Amino acid sequence: MKLVNPLPNTPVILTVDDDMATRKMIGRNLRSEGYKIVEATNGNDCLEIYSRLQPDIILLDAIMPGMDGFECCQRLQELITSPFVSPVLMITGLDDETSVDRAFNAGAADFVTKPIHWPVLLQRVKRLIYQSHLYQELEIANQELARLAMEDSLTGIANRRRMDEYLEQAWERSTEERSLLGVILYDIDFFKGYNDTYGHLAGDFCLQQVTEAIKNSLGQQNHLLARYGGEEFVVILPEIDSSNGLAIAEEIRKTINDLEIPHKMSAITHHITLSLGVAVMVAQAEHSPLRLLAKADYALYQAKTTGRNQSVLATSTFDI
Ligand SMILES: [Mg+2]
């Protein structure tokens, strides 16, 4: 099998050995294969250089004064974080079973024994770097997939699935801590008319513009903004009281009102406006978060039927 380095950069090898002659030999042999070599003479230096450089592989001498290779390998595992998992190749003069076991138990990916058989070392280095690069690419792809699975593709904010998950967690926390939990449910007034008049591409662009402005207006608060479906959106606000929840809803409404995105089919004005329903409650273990959403939905319905371009706070008389 021909191993092709999937990354364009020159791989960096960190060689850790207390013996200068061994370091020089390893350096010479690996440099001639095109690798970049960084040297350390003891375990502490190895940990320090690792944190700074994150080399592609660490060749670690097992027997060193002070911190030995096994301990150093163990401590490296705490520094190594996914997806950049640098493999450790342990080099030991002891080829008895105990040291092999100790090397693997400490987290080493493989080992070679001294005296070093150079073709074996070169093949192992090449294979370990190749495998770790593949692993990195796979991990990065997985993280990207996980992100996409939680994101609304049009607006880039959280999708319904992410919202359900977040709301469930926030509901549980509110139940445990007896803290208030708020949601704002909003939609764009006369949006069907907008799509019918300006077309669906313009409709999509409008949703993006509105979302971007709301993202900015929400700033760094503790919240989740999500697309609920179509032109309906949700803001989940943990630990918020009714007056602050309503104030945030009004801020959102004003932000979009002030954008003055033309909308000639609006029956109340000539630009895009929002109607918003706000609900705040302490979660109860015997109910599901749907109760909170239903209250906000009812408040949104009130906002729609009593004039639009307004925020309505669900009161206890809305209890269902
Ligand atoms: Mg040594």
Image: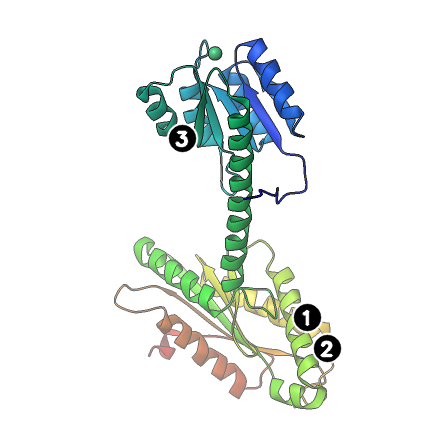
Task: Give the quarter of the figure containing the N terminus.
Answer: top right
- For mark 3, what is the residue? 107
Q: Residues within 10 Å of mark 1 (few under 14, many from 20)?
A: some
Kind of element beneath mark 2: loop
Q: Residue at x 49, y 41 (%)?
A: 82
Q: Can I make out residue 41 in this image?
A: yes
Residue 33 percent location from the top left of the image: 65, 29
Tell me which amino acid carries mark 2.
Ile
- For mark 1, what is the residue? 209
Q: Residues within 10 Å of mark 2 (few under 14, many from 20)?
A: some
Q: Can I make out residue 268 in this image?
A: no
Tell me which amino acid carries mark 3.
Gly
Taking the image as shown, residue 260 lies to the left or right of residue 43, namely: right
Relative to 286, is 101 above or below? above
Tell me which amino acid carries mark 1.
Gln
Taking the image as shown, residue 171 lies to the left or right of residue 117, namely: left
